[in-house]
Image (spheres, helix red, strand yellow):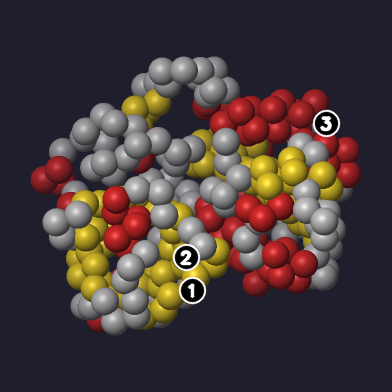
Amino acid sequence: MGANLPASLLVPQPAVIVGRTQESPSIFTMKLCLEDAAAQSAYRHSLGQFNMLYLPGVGEVPISIMSDPDDRQAIGHTIRTVGRVTNRLAELQVGDRIGLRGPFGRGWPMEAMQGRDVVVITGGLGCAPVVAVIHYILRRRGDFGHLTIIQGVKKAEDLIWREQYAQWNTQPDTHVMVAADEGGTLWPWHVGRVTDLFDRISMQPDKAMAVMCGPEGMMVVSAKMLTERGLPEENIFLSMERNMHCAVGHCGHCQFGGSFICKDGPVFSWPQVKGLIAHRGF
């Protein structure tokens, strides 16, 4: 199986850091450019796919791709420091070099979303896969219908990109709603569960699609509530997370029922996962 895969998926390619932004104390965005100019020019990805970022002597980690597919200058990733590899990546600066394998997996159905209302739901800090969708739609605003953005966090201070959410809310035909389980003194949005906001969603169910990322329990409840509001199950898509090591379906660490998150996902439709998601052991 591995012999049929291109070298870029099996062997890390040298990449240089060309941009870095500290988003919060534990989250940063890193822009990479493959050292080989021809490889960078040929690099193509779909929204929702991921790369494996490699540090010699430290290890590899799967990271969602944040950049626009039409951007040929750099490959963007937003990273949360949660382990050995990500903590070491956080120490790097512009000009430093790492290895990159990818892109991997199945992304969001962006073509199918064109002309439709789009509901974007994300919970916690794992919002990178859907933030890329938001940027994509806003840069091509005329190609999509009404855009609803719903973000939920546990604590008010967990919300990154606050100014960005406020700016999105000023865009045409766009509605942003944010909820925190625990709000602060100056918290301007809803205090409570993210699903409390669902009654305010503006969409035509027969002409809408939903994408979501975050804790599996939240996604299960959200999917059920959306279907109760008339959204067809096949128009709901989720980005799943598992412990991915090889990214090509060899190691089995990310097996999900009969599928592998790394090559069959990480984006799945709700009918594909509803029988297994949120059950321990899957």
Nearer to us: label 2 or label 3: 2
Q: Earlier in the sequence, mark 2 or mark 1?
A: 1
Q: Is residue 216 above or below residue 66?
A: above
Amino acid type indicated by mark 2: Phe
Amino acid type indicated by mark 3: Arg
**Residue at horizontal 41%, vertical 18%?**
281
Q: Which residue in the structure is indicated by mark 1? A: 21
Of the pair 181 and 245, the residue shown nearer to us: 181
Q: Is residue 204 above or below residue 163?
A: above
Which image quarter is the C terminus in?
A: top left
Nearer to us: label 3 or label 1: 1
Q: Is residue 46 visible?
A: no
Q: Is residue 11 above or below residue 272?
A: below
Of the pair 216 and 162, the residue shown nearer to us: 162
Query: For numbered disc 1, what is the local secondary structure?
Result: strand
Question: Residue 202: where, in percent of width, then height?
Answer: 86, 47
Amino acid type indicated by mark 1: Thr
Q: Which residue in the structure is indicated by mark 3? A: 229
Res 271 → quadrant = top right
Tell me whether circle 2 and circle 1 mark residues in contact (CB < 8 Å).
Answer: yes
Of the pair 267 and 199, the residue shown nearer to us: 199
Query: For numbered disc 3, what is the local secondary structure?
Result: loop
**Residue at horizontal 48%, vertical 38%?**
240
Residue sticking out furthest to the left: 3
Task: Mark 3: give few (<14), some (14-19) or many (20+) Cα within 10 Å.
Answer: some
90 to the left or right of 14: right
**Residue at horizontal 57%, vertical 49%?**
125
Disc 3 and disc 1: Cα gap in Å? Answer: 39 Å
Query: For numbered disc 2, what is the local secondary structure?
Result: strand
Question: Residue 200: where, in percent of width, then height?
Answer: 88, 44
119 to the left or right of 161: right
Q: Earlier in the sequence, mark 3 or mark 1?
A: 1
